Image: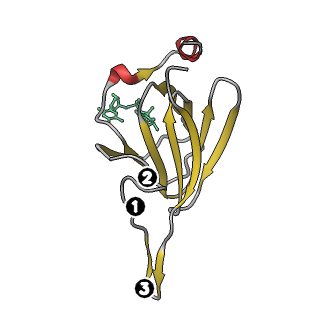
Amino acid sequence: MKYNQDVRLVSLRPKGDDRGKLIAIEENTESLPFSVKRVYYIYDTTPNVVRGKHAHRNLKQLLICTSGNCTIMCDDGVQRVEYTLNWPDKGLLIDGLIWREMKDFSKGSVLMVLASDRYDESDYIRDYGVFKEELLK
Ligand code: T46
């Protein structure tokens, strides 16, 4: 296939002491295997909304629910797997041509995303039929 396709849960190691916890994420490491060009976060989400519903051709992303919880459904064209992000030390790496939907956002949740590229609408596939066609290339 022309594109990468990989989804992986990663554990982020907190540095804890009696003051609380701190997580540091460095680029080009096992938990973040790319250089970060953009950070965005999703918050104040409308109840019961489903976001995403698209795939990316080349973008790599690390998703972390830094507060609250949400569910990420990932579809590689063969199977759909749901991942619950419910703690800041858990990340979901999504690389390439994966259809994704984000849902079940808890009240007050914040989904932070570290991305390998700047925003580029031409990298998006927002039509499921086109996504299936791209998988065959
Ligand atoms: C993804 C999931 C996890 C920008 O102007 N710059 C940006 O960096 C982003 C991400 C979005 N936008 C604009 C484009 C739309 O007008 O913000 C609006 C909402 O974006 P979108 O509908 O694509 O948001 P989601 O939550 O459906 O998807 C986002 C990311 O776009 C996507 O890359 O993988 O989160």
Residue named by callout 2: 32
Which quarter of the rendered picture does the C terminus lie within? top right
- Circles 1, 2 touching at the beta carbon (< 8 Å): yes
What residue is rendered at 42% in x and 56% in y?
Answer: 29
Residue named by callout 3: 19
- Closer to viewer: mark 1 or mark 3: 1
Numbered label attached to residue 75: none
Please determine whether, in this image, residue 4 is positioned above or below residue 85: above
Please determine whether, in this image, residue 94 is positioned above or below residue 86: above
Please determine whether, in this image, residue 44 is positioned above or below residue 29: above
Please tell me in which quadrant of the rendered image residue 135 appears: top right
Looking at numbered disc 2 in the image, what kind of residue is underneath it?
Leu
Numbered label attached to residue 25: 1
- Find numbered disc 3 in the image and state the secondary structure of the residue it sits on: loop
Q: Residue 9: where, in percent of width, then height?
A: 59, 51
Q: Give the CA distance from mark 1 to mark 3.
A: 19 Å
Please determine whether, in this image, residue 48 is positioned above or below residue 57: below
What residue is rendered at 61% in x and 35% in y?
Answer: 74
Q: Give the CA distance from mark 1 to mark 2.
A: 7 Å
Q: Give the CA distance from mark 3 to mark 2.
A: 26 Å
Q: Give the camera-side residue of 40 and 76.
A: 76
Q: Give the camera-side residue of 113 and 111.
A: 113
Q: Residue 80: where, in percent of width, then height?
A: 69, 32
Looking at numbered disc 1 in the image, what kind of residue is underneath it?
Ile
